[in-house]
């Protein structure tokens, strides 16, 4: 084969592979592909029982409500603290909107061994999670791998006692389907997704 034709064939093969890997070029990162998949496929989420910051059990997703789930670990020095502040802002917006009483906010720890109810309550207290609209909770250790896989959350130990992880707001509708994944500061987008999730 002529070298120019061989190069063209190789380039076309590369473009085809990139198209397949990027959901038809709609997503050029793993995170954007994860978000597109949620919006398009609306996958059913695992139903599990969590332990909340006050030690009581709670169903995830919340029965009959739309649920916003963010994944955190309470000893995170930076990104989870910012996410907690943004979740507090979302709580305030929801409490003052037609969504009040119809939405459950859950900051879900992926470090259940260290995030005891006492530690989760401290984190909740720092950010104003009072338990009514918004709580901090942890899964049973056996449920954690399945939850991370279902929501598409990546958690990597950083060898310094912490974790690198993706942070987002995961909106689950009343039927328990993941319908949107948004940046933690996209409060208007979260409100709109919740309104749709409750229809």
Image (cartoon, helix red, strand yellow):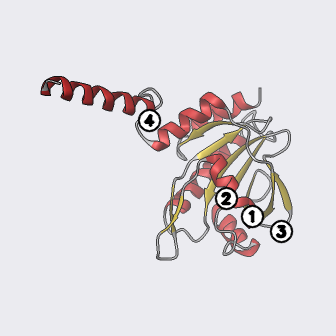
Q: Secondary structure at mark 2?
A: helix
Residue at 59% in and 48% down: 152
Residue 120 spot, x, y in % from top left: 70, 69
Q: Quadrant of the N terminus?
A: top left
Q: Nearer the viewer, mark 4 or mark 2?
A: 4
Quarter of the picture holding the C terminus? top right
| Mark nearer the viewer, 3 or 1 | 1
**Pointer 1: residues within 10 angstroms few (<14), some, or many (20+)?**
few
170 in relation to 173, above or below = below
| 1 and 2 marks in contact (CB < 8 Å) | yes
Q: Return the residue found at the far left.
A: 3
Residue 20 shown left or right of residue 147 in the figure? left
Earlier in the chain: of badge 3 and badge 1, it is 3
Residue carrying label 4 = 21
Q: Position of residue 23 (x, y in %)?
A: 48, 30
The answer for how far apart the CA atoms under marks 3 and 4 are is 43 Å
**Of marks 3 and 4, which one's residue comes earlier in the chain?**
4
Q: Residue at x 56, y 48 (%)?
A: 168
Which one is in front in this view, the residue at disc 3 or the one at disc 4?
A: 4
User: Is the residue marked by circle 3 packed among few (<14), some (14-19), or many (20+) residues within 10 Å?
Assistant: some
Going from N to C along the chain, the mark reached first, 4 or 2, is 4
Mark 1 lies on a secondary structure that is: helix
Residue on which the image places disc 2 = 145
Tell me the residue that label 3 is attached to: 55
- Camera sees residue 49: yes
Front residue of this view, candidates 31 and 70: 31
Q: Residue at x 48, y 38 (%)?
A: 32
Q: What residue did someone put label 1 on?
A: 142
């Amino acid at each position: 084969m002529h070298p120019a034709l061989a190069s063209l064939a190789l380039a076309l093969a590369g473009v085809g592979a990139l198209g397949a890997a990027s959901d038809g070029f709609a997503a050029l990162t793993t995170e954007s592909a994860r978000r597109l998949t949620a919006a398009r496929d609306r996958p059913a989420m695992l139903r599990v029982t969590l332990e909340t910051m006050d030690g009581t059990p709670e169903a995830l997703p919340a029965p009959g409500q739309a649920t916003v789930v963010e994944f955190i670990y309470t000893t995170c020095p930076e990104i989870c603290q910012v996410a907690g502040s943004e979740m507090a802002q979302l709580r305030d917006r929801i409490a003052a909107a037609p969504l009040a009483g119809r939405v459950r906010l859950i900051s879900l720890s992926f470090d259940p061994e260290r995030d005891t109810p006492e530690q989760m309550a401290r984190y909740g207290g720092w950010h104003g999670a009072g338990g009514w609209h918004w709580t901090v909770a942890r899964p049973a250790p056996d449920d954690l791998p399945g939850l991370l896989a279902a929501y598409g959350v990546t958690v990597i130990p950083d060898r310094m006692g912490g974790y690198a992880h993706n942070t987002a707001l995961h909106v689950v509708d009343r039927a328990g389907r993941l319908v949107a994944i948004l940046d933690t500061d996209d409060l208007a987008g979260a409100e709109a997704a919740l309104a749709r999730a409750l229809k």
